[in-house]
Amino acid sequence: MAVTLPEPVRVSPLIKTCRWTALGLGIWWGTKRYAALKAEEDEIRAYNAKMKPIWDAEKAAKAAASNREQMIYLAKESGTPIPEGF
Amino acid sequence: MAKLVKNIPVLIELAKPKLSTFVRYAKVELVPPSPAEIPAAIGDASKKIANLQKQTFRNWTVKEAAINTVVGLEVFCWFFIGECIGKGSLVGYQV
């Protein structure tokens, strides 16, 4: 390489301080925000995990009820006798 | 993959001059302020705030304005680099 690179620039102290202060502030803000968002998301996840069996049971009950109604309708239309206690 | 791993010593040797150039500049330009420089920085900052109040920036040449804008933007971007480090991810918070 025949190119001579320029001398390194002596950066003003103000710029250096501002840069590294901004870096430190950014790191602090990043960790703070991450902790807060993680706490929220963990709550939501815990709530969903708690409610999942309840919701699954509700959905299953609803599906069974609608299935029963459809079977009764089909039986009526096709003339099949409905067994006792269905 | 094995070929890549075999080439690593060669790549390191190729990268050394570039790395040394980078270190040569980084040692002067990217180094944090020494404790002696901080009072000078604070004095400089109060001068800049006084300039802001006096609105001397209205007398900047276009070249000065462009340089100052870019430098200000760069300082501001270090905040976002710090935020990426703090949140431990490049894009978005991986909660």
Image (tube, rainbow, N blue to C red):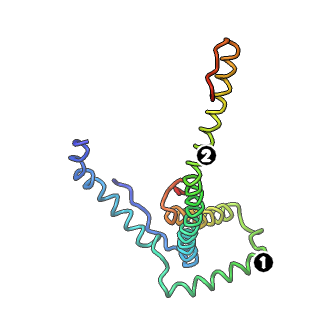
- The residue singled out by tag 2 in the image is A55
The dot on residue B75 is none
Judging from the image, what secondary structure is the residue with disc 1 in?
helix
How far across and down, in percent of the image, does residue B9 sit?
A: 22, 53
- Dividing the picture into quadrants, the one containing residue A40 is bottom right
In the image, what residue type sits under mark 1?
Gln
> To which chain does the residue with label 2 belong?
A
**Of B31 and B21, the residue lying toward us:** B31
How far across and down, in percent of the image, does residue A59 sit?
A: 62, 39
Q: Are marks 1 and 2 on the same chain?
A: no
- On screen, B5 above or below A14? above
> To which chain does the residue with label 1 belong?
B
In the image, what residue type sits under mark 2?
Trp
B58 horizontally vs A15: left or right: right
- Dividing the picture into quadrants, the one containing residue B60 is bottom right
Q: Which quarter of the rendering shows the C terminus of chain A?
A: top right
**Of B31 and A2, the residue lying toward us:** B31
- On screen, A19 above or below A77? below
Q: Nearer the viewer, mark 1 or mark 2?
A: 2
> For the point 53% across and 66% down, which residue is it?
B82
How far across and down, in percent of the image, does residue B31 sit?
A: 45, 74
- On screen, A18 above or below B68? below
- Dividing the picture into quadrants, the one containing residue A56 is top right
The dot on residue B53 is 1
Q: Residues within 10 Å of mark 2 (few under 14, many from 20)?
A: few
> For the point 66% across and 17% down, which residue is it?
A75
B61 horizontally vs B40: left or right: right
